[in-house]
Image (spheres, rainbow, N blue to C red):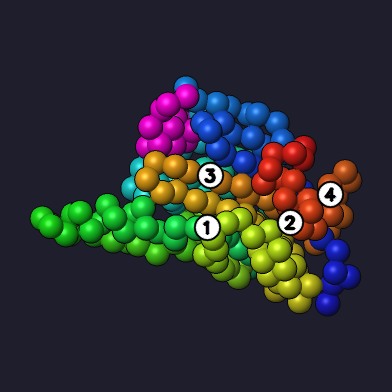
């Protein structure tokens, strides 16, 4: 068992065509840019070396991009692949993709879209990209529930099921989008805030560096 203490060692918030990493604006796109173009531009800016990105649905692209930014400065190599967990949530599950898939059924159903008609596929895409093999869960809630995600992730850390956890919110629906991810680790890192509900809420609100 751990000592019940964990720390938030990184964060990424994406909303309103802006990408924040650890509270600092890292990049922004032109206001009014359509979501598919914004995600493509963000991919080009932060990565640009993962062709599978272009096959993903919008939800997976957003979560993948947020994780890409989040983990660029994280010391992920200090954790075994099976010890990195992922706990995410959103409001609309995969309805954005479900609707687009349903529209293809009228003609020829799209297998490429059908693959993404479960919200947890975004977790799978992040795991494939980074080689993670730990526990994972995806919750659907009316709004961002800091206590739910934090308590589940803390349980994984406390029971040694994980030594680190990517947590947060990834929502896409009808062109509206928002992502807020944070990296929680069981080890203490100098200057890192405690993994508490209050600090998670600050990250989501954009009030924590």
Describe the element under mark 3 as helix, strand or loop: strand
Q: Mark 2 points at which residue?
A: 184
Q: Nearer the viewer, mark 3 or mark 2?
A: 3
Q: Nearer the viewer, mark 3 or mark 4?
A: 3
Quadrant of the rendered image containing residue 103: bottom left
Q: Name the residue under label 3.
A: 178
Q: Does the magenta stretch include residue 76?
A: no
Q: Name the residue under label 4.
A: 193
Q: Nearer the viewer, mark 4 or mark 2?
A: 4
Marks 3 and 1, Cα distance to the nearest angstrom? 9 Å
Q: Could you tell me which residue is drawn at 72 percent across and 50 percent down? A: 201
Q: Could you tell me which residue is drawn at 72 percent across and 36 percent down? A: 23
Q: Could you tell me which residue is drawn at 53 percent across and 44 percent down? A: 178
Say which label, 4 or 2, has the lower sequence index. Answer: 2
Q: Is residue 129 visible?
A: no
Q: Nearer the viewer, mark 2 or mark 1?
A: 1
Marks 3 and 2, Cα distance to the nearest angstrom? 20 Å
Q: Does the magenta stretch include residue 42?
A: yes
Q: Give the range drawn in magenta.
A: 31-44
Return the residue nearer the eye: 146 or 39: 146
**In the image: residue 95, left or right of residue 103:** right
Describe the element under mark 2 as helix, strand or loop: strand
Q: Name the residue under label 1.
A: 90
Describe the element under mark 1 as helix, strand or loop: strand
């Amino acid at each position: 068992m751990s000592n019940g203490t964990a720390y938030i060692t990184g964060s990424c918030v994406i909303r309103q065509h802006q990408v924040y990493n650890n509270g600092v604006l890292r990049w922004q796109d032109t206001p009014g840019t359509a979501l598919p173009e914004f995600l493509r531009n963000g991919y080009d800016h932060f990565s640009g070396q993962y062709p599978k990105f272009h096959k993903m649905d919008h939800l997976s692209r957003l979560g993948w991009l947020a994780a890409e930014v989040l983990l660029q400065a994280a010391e992920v190599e200090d954790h075994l692949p099976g010890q990195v967990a992922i706990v995410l949530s959103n409001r609309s599950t995969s309805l954005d993709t479900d609707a687009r898939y349903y529209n293809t059924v009228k003609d020829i159903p799209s297998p490429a879209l059908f693959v993404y008609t479960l919200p947890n596929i975004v977790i799978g895409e992040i795991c494939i990209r980074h080689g993670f093999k730990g526990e994972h869960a995806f919750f659907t809630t009316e709004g961002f529930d800091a206590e739910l995600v934090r308590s589940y992730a803390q349980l994984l850390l406390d029971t040694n099921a994980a030594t680190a956890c990517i947590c947060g919110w990834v929502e896409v629906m009808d062109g509206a989008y928002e992502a807020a991810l944070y990296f929680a680790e069981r080890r203490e890192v100098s200057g890192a805030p405690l993994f508490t509900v209050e600090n998670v809420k600050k990250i989501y609100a954009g009030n924590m560096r």
